[in-house]
Every structure is written in C-alpha cells, then in structure tokens.
Image: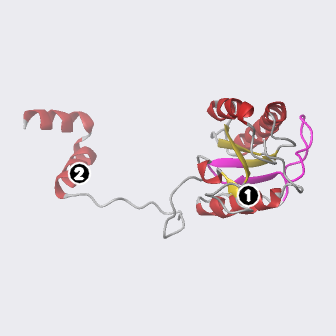
C-alpha cells in the first residue's frame, strides 16, 4: 500500500466528481442531511442528487481491508437512510444509489480482493472505490483521482451537449417507421398477426 506523504485532498476528489456529476444531471447539495441514526458523515463527504439518483462521496480513514470494510458498512447504512428519505419525498419512486468510497491511498495487493467484492455487492446501492494517483502511476496525473470514470452513473463518454429535459427520438428508416405506425394504430397483437400473414 502506498501511504500518502501529506493529508489526502478529498476536495480534489469532490471537484473531479462534481464535473462528471454535472454532465449527467446530478447536483451537489450545499449541505448534507442532518446526522441520522448511524451518526454524522465524515469530514469531506458530499452528496449529489437528481430526480433519479443519489451519489455519495464517503472518505475512508485508511486503505487497508479493515478500514475499507468499516467505511463501506458505515457509509452504506448512512446512505440507506438518505435513499429511503428521498424515496418518501418522491412518492415511493425508487432512486438509484451510488456510494463512492474515497481511499487515502492506493489499496495494497491484499485488499484488492476486498475492493472487488465490495464493488460487486449491490446491497442497498452500488459501491465504487477511488484513490488519488501516486507518483508512479504512469497513466494518471498527480492530483487526479483514479477510477472516478468507472463510477457507473458517471462513466459515460463525453458528449457535445449537456443532457436536457426533453426526449429526442432517434431517426429511423421507412420500414421501421411503418412498423411503429402499425404498432401505434393496431396494437401489438394485430401487428404480429399481420406480419405473420405477410
């Protein structure tokens, strides 16, 4: 495990997430919800919201397996209450939840299996782990956080236009348009029968 030589800059992780969250319509909350039954969120935590999802940045105190497991358990319990409260406010409509655990340094080899197991668990929400780039990371620049683009809801390719509130239908050819018109006018069963007879 690579130990940081100075305190971890969780603000840089927050800023990097903020840029990607804006692209998918997630807005950072000015303040976190009040402490709930699980206690207060750690310093550096941040929450982004939209009408379809919540994303929570949850700083971890260490990068060893025990610290990551404890932070994941606490963060998931805290986030579960936030998600339940959000679903109550939306009339019971489910919200996607993404818990981003920010490690202070690259996890050691022995913790990699625990990282993978956590990220595969979909209990309560999706979980992703990020950590700052180290000096020997050839692919990443210092100050950037690794694996941020791997966060499911954020890992979209760059687009020329920001997402809008209006739906845009794709252009379809004449044959597909004729099928679509038949489905709308006759319904599915009649369209299927007509196609079988043709």
Q: Residues within 10 Å of mark 1 (few under 14, many from 20)?
A: few
Q: Which residue is mark 2?
A: 181
Give me the residue at 14% from left, 37% from top: 195
Q: How did the renderer colour the structure?
A: secondary structure
- Name the disc covering residue 135, or none: 1
What is the residue that sits farthest to the bottom in this orientation? 160
Instruction: Select label 1 or label 2 by which is in front.
Output: 1
**Residue 131 in picture, x, y percent from top left:** 74, 49
Vertical order, 190 against 24 (above or below): above
- Across and down, in percent, residue 170 comes to 34, 59
**Coordinates of residue 23 in the picture (x, y in percent):** 59, 63
Q: Residue 163 placed where, x, y %?
A: 53, 63
Q: Could you say which is closer to the camera, residue 44 or residue 134?
A: 134
Q: Nearer the viewer, residue 82 or 1?
A: 1
Judge whether 115 appears above or below 131 on screen.
above
Q: Answer left or right for 167 relative to 145.
A: left
Q: Is residue 191 left or right of residue 12?
A: left
């Amino acid at each position: 495990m690579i130990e940081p030589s100075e305190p971890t800059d969780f603000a840089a992780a927050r800023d990097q997430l903020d840029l990607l969250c804006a692209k998918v319509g997630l807005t950072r909350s000015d303040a976190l919800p009040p402490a709930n039954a699980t206690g207060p969120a750690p310093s550096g935590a941040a929450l982004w919201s939209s009408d379809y999802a919540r994303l929570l940045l949850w700083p971890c105190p260490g990068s060893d397996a025990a610290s990551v497991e404890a932070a994941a358990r606490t963060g998931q319990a805290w986030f579960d209450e936030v998600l339940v409260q959000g679903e109550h406010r939306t009339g019971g409509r489910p919200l996607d939840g993404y818990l981003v655990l920010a490690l202070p340094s690259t996890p050691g080899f022995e913790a990699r299996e625990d990282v993978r197991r956590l990220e595969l668990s979909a209990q309560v929400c999706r979980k992703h782990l990020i950590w700052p780039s180290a000096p020997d990371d050839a692919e990443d620049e210092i100050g950037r956080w690794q694996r941020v683009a791997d966060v499911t809801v954020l890992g979209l390719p760059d687009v020329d236009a920001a997402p809008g509130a209006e739906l845009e239908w794709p252009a379809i050819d004449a044959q597909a348009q004729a099928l679509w018109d038949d489905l709308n006018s006759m319904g599915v069963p009649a369209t299927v029968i007509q196609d079988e007879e043709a």
